[in-house]
Each structure stands twice: as structure tokens, then as C-alpha cells.
Image: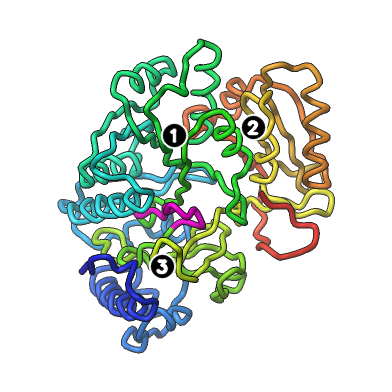
Amino acid sequence: MFIPDIERQTAAAIEVYQDIRLQDTLAYVSQYSSYYQRIFKDHAIDISQIKGTRDLFRLPTTSKEDIQRFHQELICVPEHQIIDYSTTSGTTGSPLVIPMTDRDIDRLAYNEYISLSCAGVTSADKVMLCTTMDKQFMAGIAYFLGIRKIGAGLIRAGVDALSTQWENIFRYQPTVLIAVPSFIIRLLEYAKANQIDFQRSSVQKIICIGEGIRRLDFSDNNISRRIKSQWSVELFSTYAATEMAAAFTECSCQRGGHHHPELVIVECLDADNRPLPPGQVGELTITTLGVEAFPLIRYKTGDLVSLSSPTCACGRNTVRVSPVIGRKQQRIKLKGTTIYPPAIANVLNANVNVKDYLILIENDELGSDAVSVFVEAVNESNTQHELQRAIKGHLRVSPKLELANIAQLRKRYQVHKKRKPVKILDRRSALQQGFFQQESQLAVV
């Protein structure tokens, strides 16, 4: 039950709409999910007492470990109704398998249609999709279906050779690219090395996926600045999670990813699973709406964000999701200072001499956090000392830094076949469970 342009309804109307959709979802999982049937019984939960989103705190949360352990119990349809099996990227652990029905695929198409429309993509555009559609990658299918629903032209370029990417750009004249920001950096480096006049290209905007391009205050981070300092294009940030089969994309105001109230309920929780007010950083937690095969109630994504709710200048009245500060489990306590890997990555992305990198987190002999940063440089002269100074200046602490062949390191650590290029590798024997705290020594992107 979608209401046309629900995002532009009043905040009160959106809340009423979500209250109704939540009750429908709870009734659905109570009937078809053996997992939630058991959870509600064990916690003595009467779903008739959950009147709306303000009562969500009465329900237990669902974790990644719950999905892995009770996967079969969470499936709400018979196997013959499942037409697609997607997986998460497995960036921080074993991939999660998310089954989808035909109706779920339709919902996915609708999600990407409104998400890309939010960034201003229209039927007049021609979109080049620079990401894979294979390897059980849900986003690849979502982009394809969403672009098709918008009616825009589509070039399925994938992650082919950089030379082929430029050939496609000048042959088909796309106005929009969908790509990982670090891939765009490589694309520009190739163009400059091969005297390709990329400023003459037709590309006007890039929908950035998989990596952040904003600081917490929504200003450009270093990788965004590197792209925009070289190429006159507009960049749009996105947040997506396979588990919620939805995405939050920036509008032209670029003040956070817009939440889609017809698809997902969002919360921001503290360490005790209590909802936080707008502006405070906590763990993004989602309840899916309209999902048939694998609905989730209060699923904790592990991503640390803040939510903002004032009306956006674009006219939408939906909650907006901030850039991701880091993942809860990747919190690092280095020499008494709390940091997250994106803070280190931001320094590396600012240096044009950095070709690739890998941030390795381990336990030292005392069980404390130890961080090693491996960098592959375009020119090794003075790079190591320059980066060490830059990292210490930004974070107030200095991890170990070495120059290395990153492709060989990924093979050594057996992470070279991942769907996304692994840039952060956490090999601690027991991942820290400490939660985000607003302390004076905290370093964020």
C-alpha cells in the first residue's frame, strides 16, 4: 500500500501511515515467521499492544548473528515462491543470504526508482552502470530495475577495463554514472595517463555507492574533493543495505540520504537499544515494510549514524540519514584514543600519491588494538613519512604505516575475491563491542 509522494506529506501524516504499515508487518510475521512467533512468545509480547512506531522500543532487536543462526526460521514463504537469493558483501564477516519473491523484486525496483529520482535522475538521462549485476549482488539488480522503471537509457558497463569504460562513455554519451568513488579516482588517473580529455565527456552527475563521500556535517570528504577538483561533475551520496532491500539517496540539497517511509522504519539506538533523538549518533536500526520473503523487525545494521528530521528544502518531510561514521564492531581504541577506520581512510584518500591501501586491525601481544596501514604509492619518495605526519595530525595518534603491494596483501589475507575491494580488514580475535561515545578524543571522518 504505497501513497503517492508520501515523502512530501506532513510529518504527522507520515507517522500515521507508518503506524498502520507496522501493524500490518507485525501481523504478517506473527502468522508466517516461526522466528518471530517464538521471539514474541518468549518475551510475552502482545502485538495488539504495539500501536505504532512509538511503541517499537517494546520489541526486541534482531542482530546479524540472529539471521545467521535462525535463517530458515526467518523465511516467511515456501521455497517455490523464492525467485532470487541475494547476499551481503561480507565486508565484516560471513555474507548473509536474503531471499526474495516476485513481489519483493517489484518492491526493490520501486525503491531504486524513488531513490534515483531523489537524486534527479529522469527519463531524459542515460545512465552507465559501473557495477556488477552477478555474484548475488542485490544492488546491481536494483539499479537496473530502477533505471528501467524511470525510463532512462541504460549502459550496463559493469567493472570492465578502464579503457573500455572510457570507450563506453564517449560512444554512448551517458549523463549519469553509478559507481564506487575509488573506481572514479582510478578512472580519472587512467584518463590523465592516457591523454583522455574527460572534461569533454557527457557525464554530469555520479551516484556514489559503497563508499562515503561526505563528512558528518555533510561537507565533501577527501575522496569527494579529489574527484570534484579534477572533474566538473555533481556527486550524490547513497546508503543501502541488502538486509533492508532499500536505499537512502541524497536530493539536490545534499544534506543526508532521504528515508522512504513506505519501505522502511528507521531508528537510531544507543548501546542499551534505546531510541536516540535527532542529531545524536547511534546504531542505525531498521524495520522492513512490505517485504514478503524475509521481513526483519528492528534489525541492527551495525552502522553508526545520526538522523535529522527538519523539513528539507527540497520539500520532503522524511527523516534523513547522516554519513556513516563507522561500524560498531570496527571501533578502535589506539593509544587511548577512540577512532574508526573511515577517519584513517579519509587522510589516505586526500593524498594523490596514494594508489591503494589496506587498513589492518589486530590484537597486540597484550590484547590491545594494533593498527597497521599498508599503502601502495604512485611515487614512494617521502610518501611514508608524509602520510604518517598527516595521520597523526588528523587523529592525534599514529598507527604503523608501511609501503606495500596491496593486491598481494589481499591475496595473502585471502580477501582478493570479495565483491567489494577490501580496504579495512579486522582480524582481532574478539571484535570489540564498545559503542560510540561522544568523548573528547573521538576522531571521525
Dividing the image into 4 quarters, which one contains the N terminus? bottom left
Percent coordinates x, y for residue 389 in the rendering: 83, 35
Name the quadrant containing residue 114: bottom left
Label 2, label 3: how far apart the Cα atoms are: 36 Å
Please state the extent of the stretch shown in magenta in the rendering: 245-257
Query: Measured along the vertical axis of the image, is residue 155 above or below residue 234?
Result: above
Label 1 element class: loop
Residue at 52% x, 45% y is: 93
Query: Measured along the vertical axis of the image, is residue 291 above or below residue 337?
Result: below
Reading the image, the residue beneath label 1 is 419
Tell me which numbered mark, 1 or 2, is placed earlier along the sequence.
2
Percent coordinates x, y for residue 407 in the rendering: 58, 22
Reading the image, the residue beneath label 2 is 358
Name the quadrant containing residue 305: bottom right
Tell me which numbered mark, 2 or 3, is placed earlier along the sequence.
3
Chief SS of the magenta region: loop
Viewer can see residue 62: no
Percent coordinates x, y for residue 151 in the rendering: 20, 42
Q: Which mark is residue 318?
A: 3
| Amino acid identity at mark 3 | Thr
Percent coordinates x, y for residue 347 in the rendering: 70, 38
Q: Nearer the viewer, residue 117 or 382?
A: 117
